[in-house]
Amino acid sequence: MSFVQLLNLPRLDVRTVDRLLRRESVERSVAWLKIAIVALICFLLVLTVRNVIEELLVGSSAVYSLKNDIRSRLKALPEEHSFTAPKSDYAHLADEAVFGKIGFTQPTPYATPPIAAKKVSTLTLIGTFVSEDEGSYAIIDDKKSQEVFEVGDLILNEAKVLRIFEDRVEIERNGQREILQIDETPGGGGGETVSDSIVVDEGEIDRALENLPLLLTQARAVPYFKDGQSVGLRLFAIKSGSLFEKIGLMNGDILKTVNGNSLGDITQAVKLFEKLKEQRMITVELERQREEKTLRYQIR
């Protein structure tokens, strides 16, 4: 009897061997083998995770039991072994004021020294207009030109306008406050009105009045207020060679009347200039350096 017969194994004929050795069969067997290996690995992972969780739970339970045991033992200690000291033991600490006396000493108040405002020599205040409704502004001359400035504006990119009053302007430059003040020096003449007569070329006046918008760009004018009332127009920024300069007007002049008509109302003043085309005698009353002055123009 052969060894195969003893093991009772089926005999493999040539066809069976050939079928088993086919490519498709081999690939199928390899695929099932891979699946079996993956399943085995997953099974082993599940067992590992389970063991870890059990160990953690057992450890947590042991720690919890240990804590409870310690608490029980501490509670069972006799009163004389307690570490809590009576409050009377700390009474002397409060009396001795370990950290010093409670409270603080009020510092001696002191007044902030006022900022000494000084006058500015390089700037000249021509005039101001103070109004809560329309806003305040000041006319300032920097020896090169005259401009209108409001609160917060910069003068020469180095001085800032802080406040505007009727007779002065407060500015800040290089961290210091300075004062621009209108010259209070009274003019000469003892209060008498000075009168001048000026002859003006008719053709030049006609040409200027024909282009009134251009004429108004040759100088700037702002209302001048006195005792809360507009009494005229203050001239500034008069251009060199302009008609205003030729007829003798100067920066800072306050024009009050023309031929007896008040210039307190700016709208009426514009209409008045239109009427001057037909006039050959023009009388202007103004204030220059706090001196009343009358200019009489003869147009020929």
Image (spheres, rainbow, N blue to C red):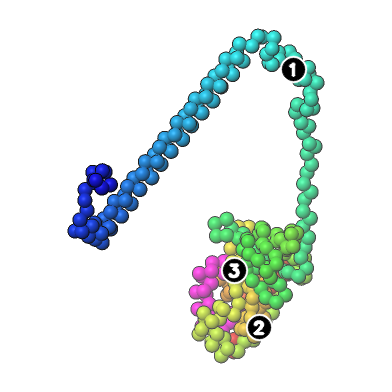
Q: Residue at x 70, y 77 (%)?
A: 144
* Cβ atoms at labels 1 and 3 below 8 Å apart: no
SS at mark 3? strand
- Pair 1/2: label in front: 1
Residue 118 placement (x, y as % from top left):
78, 60
The one nearer the camera, 136 or 105, is 105
Residue 251 placement (x, y as % from top left):
67, 74
Disc 1 versus disc 3: distance between alpha carbons? 81 Å
Is there any visible trace of residue 168 in the rendered image? no
Residue 227 placement (x, y as % from top left):
63, 57
Kind of residue sitting beneath label 2? Ser
In the rendered structure, find residue 240 and report the number of the disc placed on it: 2
Q: Is residue 243 left or right of residue 274?
A: right
The one nearer the camera, 117 or 103, is 103
Which residue is tagged 3? 222
Query: What's drawn in magenta, residue-wise?
Result: 263-283
SS at mark 1? helix
Q: Residue at x 30, y 55 (%)?
A: 30
Q: Residues within 10 Å of mark 2 (few under 14, many from 20)?
A: few
Kind of residue sitting beneath label 1? Tyr
